[in-house]
Image: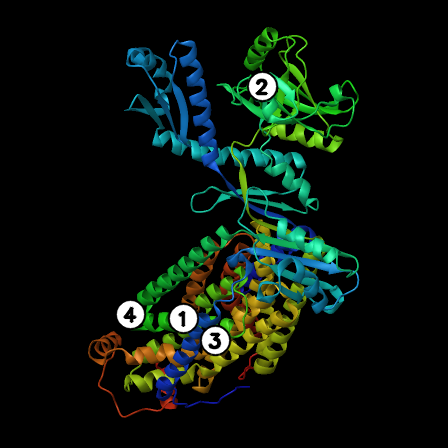
Amino acid sequence: MQIFHNPHFNFVKYRWPALIVSWVVILAGVVGIYLKGLPLGVEFSGGTIVIVQFDKMPGIDQVRGALDKSFGGGENVVVQRYGTESLRQIMIRVPQVGRESGTELGQAARDVETALGASNLGAFKRVGTEIIGPVVGRELTSKGITAFLLSLFFILLYIWFRFQFSFAVGATVATLHDVLVTLAFLVFFRVDLSLNVIAALLTITGYSTNDTIVIFDRVRENLRGTRRDNLNDLVNSSINQTLNRTLITGGTAFLGVVALYIFGGEVLRGFAFTMIVGLITGTYSSIFIAAAIVTFWPHGRGGARIAASAPVATAARPTATARQRKGARGGAGS
Amino acid sequence: MNNLRWRLALIVVIIGACLWAIIPPEKKIRLGLDLKGGVHLVLRVDAEEALKLETMNSSERFRESLESGGVTGVTVTVLSPTQFQVTGLQPAQDAVFRQLAVDLQAMFDRQPGAGGYTFAMKPNVARDMRIATVVQARMTIERRVNELGVAEPIIAQQGTEQDHLLVQLPGVTDVDRAKAVIQSTAQLQLKLVEQGPAPTRESLLQASGGKEPPGTEVLPGVQDRAQAGAPAAQMVYYLVRKVPILTGRDLRSAKQGPDQYNQPAVHFEVKGDAATRFGKSTRENINRLLAIVLDGTIVSAPNIEGAISDQGQISGSFTMQEAEDLALKLRSGALPAPLTYMQETTIGPTLGQDSINSGVLASTISLALVTVFMLVFYRLSGVNAIVALVGNLIILLGAMSYINATMTLPGIAGFVLTMGMGVDSNVLIFERIKEEMEAGRGVRASLNAGFSRVFLTLIDTHLSALIGAAFLFQFGTGPIRGFATTLFFGLMSNLFTSTFVSKTLFEAVLSQRHTETLSI
C-alpha cells in the first residue's frame, strides 16, 4: 500500500509562500511573547506547585475561592484538575512569596494547605509538591539555550562534513525554524515552558534534522546520477521520491506522540504537545524550507560546487522525468 | 546459509541476554524518583559564611594573643568575610605586634594602614576553603542521609560554581524529618558562662555597662529543666566566652540515652587530644556553668562539678526522636556552612504510580497503533518490522538495566519516540526496496540494494539525533537525563535491529521458500 504512487508535486514552486507563512507564524509568536510574555513553567519562574488529593472532588472555582483570600486572585494563582476525574487531584500553582530566604522554601505550600483546610472542602492530602527558588530558573534558561545552540552547531558541522555547506545551512535554518514555530505555538496555546518542554524542543532539534537528511541524501544521490537537470527540478524530484517515507514516518511518530498526549498523564502533556507541533512543522520544514534553501544558495559559486561534486557532471540534458531517472539509477547501481 | 544460522543465533543470544536482564521488570528496572516517589532537593552551600567564621575566629584568637602579649588599646573589627582590621596600635608596640602576627601569615596578607593593619585572607586560601566547604558539606550530608537509612540516595555537586548540592531520597515519606536532619548545621560548641542566666539581654549586660565585654557574647537559651523543675518554656540569656573550649569536631561518638532524670539526652565521647584540653579547662573552672551551644542557641548550661575529659552528656528538653536526630547529626559532623534551599520537590508514592500507569498505557497504545499501521501498509513485511521494533525495545531496556540506568517518566516518552525512530528506519528501507522492485529488479537484489543504500542515510540520521541526545543529557538532571539516556540507547539499538536484525529476518524467510514477489 502506498499513499502516493509516483508523486510529482512541485514543492519548490511553493517555497516563497511557505517561507512567508512560516515568518508570519514566527512573528505572531514574537508578538504574543511581547504582549503576554512567555508562559514560563514553575521551573523557570520560581514558585510553588502543590498537588492535592481530595476525598471528595470539589469544584475548581471553590478551590480558587479558598485561595483568593491568602494569595489574591488573578493570573498569579493557577488551579487545575490534575489527571483523570477519578484521581480527585487538583494542581495549585502559586508564585514565590518573598525571596528565597534562609533554609525555608516551604512557606507557600503550607499556606496553601492552611487556606484549603480553612475552607470546608472536605478532607485532603498533599500528594506532591514542587518548590523552586528564583535562582534555579535563570541557570536553567542559560543552560537550555547553550545546549540548544551547541547541538545546532554540531549538527551543522556534521552535515557540512557529510554533505556540503549549503545543505548544512538548509538543515540548520529548517531546525531553527521548527523550534521557533513550535515556540510560537506554545505561546498561542499558553503551554507552560517546563523542563520537559525544553527537553522536547531539544529533541526536535535532533529529530527535525532527520527528515531533512533523508531528503538531502536523495538529492546527493541524484546528483551523482548520470542524468542531470537543473537544481530546482532535481531537488523537487528528490522530495517527491522520499515523500511516501516522509509522510509514513511522520504519521507513525505522530501516532506515538498523540498517544502520549492523550494517555501519558499530566506530567507529559506539555512534552507531548511540543512534540506534536514539532513533528508537524519538522515534516513541513524539511519539504518546504530546508530543500528550498539549498536551491536559494547562490547559483554561481554554490551551484558550481554542487555540480563539481557530482562524479559525472554533464550539462543538463533535456528534463528527464523522475520515473526515467529512477529506472536509470536502478539499472546503474548494484 | 551457515552464515545466516550464525546471525540468527547471535540475535537470539542478544535478545535473550536482554530479556534476562529485565525480567521481572518490577525488580530489574531501576525507577527514577518521579516514578518511585521521594524527595528531590537542591541546596546551595553558602561558603562565604564558612570564610566569615574562619576570619572571625582568627581575629578573635589574635585579639586574645595581643591582650596576653601586652599590646593594649587596639580594636579588632571584621570588615568582610575575608578581611579584618586592627586599629589604635601605638607605634612603640609595632615590633611586638608584628611578632604576634607571625601566626597569621599562613592565611592572611597584611597591609599597613592608618594606626594599624588590615588583614585579608589570601585568595588561594579563600578559594581552597570555598571548595573544601562545599565538599565537606556534601560529605556531611552523605553521612547523615546514610544514617537515615535511605536506599539508593543520590548526593551530587552541581551548578556552574559546583556549589549546589543535589539530594535525592527515593521512597522517603517523612519529608520534614529528612529536611530537618539535612539542613541543620548542628554546630555544637561548649562555652564557659561568664554571667547568667538572666531574663533579658539588658539585665545581663547591666554590670558591664550595656555592652558585651571583649571576647564574650550574649546567647539565648531555654531555662534548664533541672533548675526550674518545670517544663522549660521561658527564654533566658547567658553571657559566654566567644572561643569555645570544645566543638562538634572534637567528638568521637554520640548516642541517645536517658539522663539522670530519665529524660532523653545525648551522650558523647571526646577524641584523645581534645579530651586533654577539655579536661584541663573543666578542672580550672569547677563550679562554673558550661553552656552547651547548638547552632547558636544554648540547649542547657549545667554546672561543672568536676574535671570532665573524655565523656559528657547533653540534656535539654528533647523528645526521644529529637535526641536521636541530634546524636545522628553530631556523629555525622557539623555542616561547615549554612545551606539555602533552591528547589524542593516531593513526589508522593501514589503520584509516581499514576505516572507509571499512564506511561505504560501510552506506550502500549502507541505500540498497538504502530503495529496496525505497519501491517496495513507493509503487510507481511510489516510483521518483520514489528519483530525488529519489539527486539529494539527489549535491547533498549536490557542495555539500560545492564548499565544500571534509571527509568524516568520522560524516559518512557523516550521509549515512545524510539518506536517512532525504529519505524522510520524500517519505512526508509521498505520504501527503497519497493522502488528497487518497481525498477524491475528481483526480490533478493532489491532487498540487498534497499538495505545497503539506506544504511548510510541511517548512520547520518542516527548520528545527528545522537548529537541532540548528548546535549540533552548535558543539559538535564534527573528525569531529563533519563530521557536522554533512553533516546541514546534507543538510537543505538535501533541501528542494530532495523538493519542487521530486519535483514536477517528477511533472508531467513527467503531461504525457506523461493519467491518472486515480496509482500511489502
Same chain under badges 1 and 4? The reply is yes
Q: Is residue A318 above or below residue B2?
A: below
Q: Nearer the viewer, residue A38 or A209?
A: A38
Chain of residue at mark 1: A
Q: Amino acid at mark 4?
A: Phe
Nearer to us: label 3 or label 1: 1
What whole-number distance in Å separates the C-alpha atoms at marks 1 and 4? 15 Å
Query: Dot 1 lies on which element?
Result: helix
Nearer to us: label 2 or label 4: 2
In this figure, which residue is indicated by the disc labeled 3?
Answer: B428
Same chain under badges 3 and 1? The reply is no
Q: Nearer the viewer, residue B389 or B298?
A: B298
Q: Are marks 3 and 4 in contact (CB under 8 Å)?
A: no
Can residue B21 be seen here? The reply is: no
Q: Are marks 3 and 1 in contact (CB under 8 Å)?
A: no
Query: Dot 2 lies on which element?
Result: strand
Residue A320 locus on image (x, y percent):
32, 91
Q: Amino acid at mark 1?
A: Thr
Nearer to us: label 2 or label 1: 2
Q: Residues within 10 Å of mark 1 (few under 14, many from 20)?
A: many
Chain of residue at mark 2: B
Residue B277 locus on image (x, y percent):
55, 11
Chain of residue at mark 3: B
Q: Is B410 left or right of B85, judged from the image as shown?
A: right
What whole-number distance in Å separates the C-alpha atoms at marks 3 and 2? 77 Å
Q: Residues within 10 Å of mark 2 (few under 14, many from 20)?
A: many
Q: Residue furthest left?
A: A300
In this figure, which residue is indicated by the disc labeled 4?
Answer: A165
Residue A5 locus on image (x, y percent):
48, 89
In this figure, which residue is indicated by the disc labeled 2?
Answer: B191
Q: Amino acid at mark 3?
A: Leu
Q: Are marks 2 and 1 in contact (CB under 8 Å)?
A: no
